[in-house]
């Protein structure tokens, strides 16, 4: 997602900071305190403008959600929407994630979403892909034993790569389809119900959406 020049970005972020976590590293091991309850915590890396996580948070008040986005100009819209919806079960922070262990204690996470992650098409950049095996191993450290990861992408090459990495990292595939928005998949997978901005854009052109839960 391209960074746009947003007028008065800092001021607008400050004006919409009710759900913004300024120091997410300080929340490590105490997210239950941040949310004020022991409900399960799900996290999305690269939430963009937040459509996906906002719908989840609206539909599931008994689940807590953390949305992370590296670009502040992109995440501003998510912060505005969180305030409009008064979503007390959602927190957002701005950072490019390298190690989830910087923000979460072992076993603190009940689920992880990776939606339309940057493909990093050059082979020499493979380690930067969020589904690179070392990253998948890293996520496991902060996830509960029964927690799952959901990954969606329009990018066939990234999907093939990710399936190899999922196997290499020792995960079992729980759900998978190459066409999440076919009528059969729409009936089968709850993930079809929660779409992202990128997903809507690609689906509108007839592009198939790849989905795997593991
Ligand atoms: C292609 S966009 C997809 C946005 C959104 N998930 C969607 O589907 O509409 C990828 C987003 O992930 C963010 N991103 C990429 N790597 C990230 C990282 N390591 N930590 C946080 N955000 C990241 C980018 O800034 C960008 O906004």
Image (cartoon, rainbow, N blue to C red):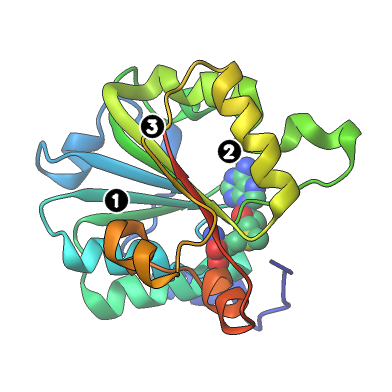
Q: Is residue 16 visible?
A: no
Q: Quadrant of residue 206?
A: bottom right
Q: Tell which tag, 2 or 3, sits nearer the viewer.
A: 2
- For mark 1, what is the residue? 65
Q: Quadrant of ligand 1?
A: bottom right
Q: Position of residue 3 (x, y in %)?
A: 72, 69
Answer above or below: position of 84 versus 123. below
- Closer-to-camera residue (16/39): 39
Q: Tell which tag, 1 or 3, sits nearer the viewer.
A: 1
Label drawn at residue 97:
2
Q: Secondary structure at mark 2?
A: loop
- For disc 3, does the CB lie below 8 Å from ligand 1? no
Q: Quadrant of residue 107?
A: top left
Q: Earlier in the sequence, mark 1 or mark 2?
A: 1
Q: Earlier in the sequence, mark 2 or mark 3?
A: 3
- For disc 2, does the CB lie below 8 Å from ligand 1? yes
- For mark 3, what is the residue? 26
- Closer-to-camera residue (10/117): 117
In the picture provided, is 74 more to the left or to the right than 14?
right
The residue sitting at 74% across, 35% down in the picture is 128
The residue sitting at 35% across, 28% down in the picture is 28
Q: Are marks 1 and 2 in contact (CB under 8 Å)?
A: no
The quadrant in which the C terminus is found is top left
């Amino acid at each position: 997602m391209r960074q746009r020049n947003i007028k008065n970005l800092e001021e607008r972020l400050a004006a919409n900071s009710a759900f913004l976590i300024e120091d997410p590293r300080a929340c490590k091991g105490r997210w239950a305190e941040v949310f004020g309850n022991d409900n399960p915590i799900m996290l999305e890396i690269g939430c963009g403008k937040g459509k996906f996580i906002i719908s989840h948070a609206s539909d599931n008040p008994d689940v807590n959600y953390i949305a992370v986005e590296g670009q502040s100009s992109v995440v501003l819209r998510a912060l505005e929407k969180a305030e409009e919806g008064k979503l007390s079960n959602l927190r957002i922070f701005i950072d490019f994630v390298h190690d989830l262990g910087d923000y979460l204690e072992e076993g603190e996470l009940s689920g992880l979403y990776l939606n339309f992650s940057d493909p990093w098409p050059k082979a020499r950049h493979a380690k930067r892909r969020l589904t690179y095996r070392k990253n998948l191993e890293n996520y496991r450290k902060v996830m509960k034993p029964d927690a799952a990861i959901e990954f969606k992408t329009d990018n066939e090459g990234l999907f093939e790569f990710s399936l190899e990495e999922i196997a290499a990292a020792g995960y079992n595939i729980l759900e998978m389809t190459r066409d999440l928005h076919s009528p059969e998949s729409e009936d089968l997978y709850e993930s079809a119900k929660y779409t992202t901005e990128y997903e809507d854009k690609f689906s509108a052109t007839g592009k198939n959406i790849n989905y795997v839960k593991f």
